[in-house]
Image (spheres, helix red, strand yellow):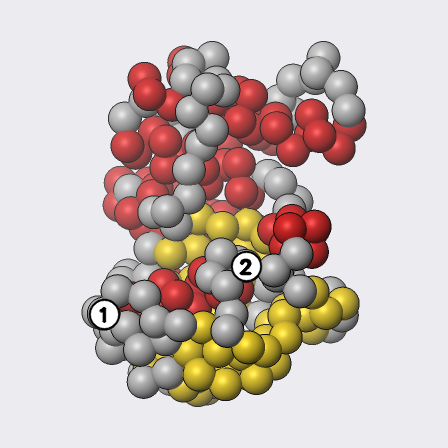
Amino acid sequence: MHVVQLQDYSVPPQGSGEGLRDISFTLATGDVCAIESPNSDDAQLFLKALATLAMPSKGTYVFNGQPHDLRRYGDMLCCKQRIGYVARDAALISNLTVRQNLLLQRYYHENRLDIDLEPDVLRLCQSFGLMEKLDQRPSLLNTMEIQAAIVIREWTKKAHVMLLSQPEDFIGHAKFDLLVALFEQMIAQRLPTVFLSFDQRLFARFANRKIVVDKGSLTMTVPGTISAGSP
């Protein structure tokens, strides 16, 4: 089943990139796609396009078989709620504690505030060393702790798609085994995943499709020899 489709999709360039021009792309259940690009801004732009964070100049965004007009906030929001996005431009809400940030989507869907973190979320917090920080606001956390909280929030939101930019930097090389375990869970659940990484081990072990973004175009291949995330 196709979870995300971009049809004749164009996105204006950002930074030093060339943008995306009339690309078509499908992401299906079980796909684990690694991005390769000679321009890091274009690689990031493609992830943002999938995450509905880069407004297209033309084209159609299809999510779970339903076309959406991303200029309409309601259309964009219903997609975004089901997309896990872990990248440097992701953020926690500054006036909420870490615990409240992790519970925010449940507050909304369950329409109640007397809930707490589930055991699997607490186990992740323990693994990432956040148990003592759960009732602090993001301003009291260091950068790695904030990034770890974002990983946990996005992973536990029950997303239909997971998008990751350099996840090794979020988790830290010292916790690489934890990152491998998260990827293994994604694959076991056949969660459609797109990632950009400079760690060759992630490419070699997990990717079953390669996305090359170059000069505004997009090419799909089955991974063979991959030069991880060319800057």
Residue tagged 2: 52
Q: Is residue 165 above or below residue 95?
A: below
Nearer-the-camera pick, 154 or 138 = 138
Q: Is residue 123 left or right of residue 13?
A: right
- Percent position (x, y) of residue 136? 42, 14
- Percent position (x, y) of residue 5? 63, 74
Residue tagged 1: 16
User: In terms of image quadrants, where is residue 127?
Assistant: top left
Q: Crowdedness of circle 2 by 10 Å Cα count: few (<14), some, many (20+)?
A: some
User: In terms of image quadrants, where is residue 161?
Assistant: bottom right
Q: Residue at x 62, y 22 (%)?
A: 117
**Mark 2–mark 1 CB contact (< 8 Å):** no
Q: Residue at x 33, y 83 (%)?
A: 214
Q: Quadrant of the C terminus?
A: bottom left
Nearer-the-camera pick, 53 or 190 = 53
Q: Is residue 226 above or below residue 93?
A: below
Determine the secondary structure under disc 2: loop
Does the rendering let one see residue 201? no
Nearer-the-camera pick, 56 or 37 = 56
Determine the secondary structure under disc 1: loop
Q: Which mark is residue 195?
A: none
Does the rendering let one see residue 20? yes
Q: Is residue 105 left or right of residue 171?
A: right
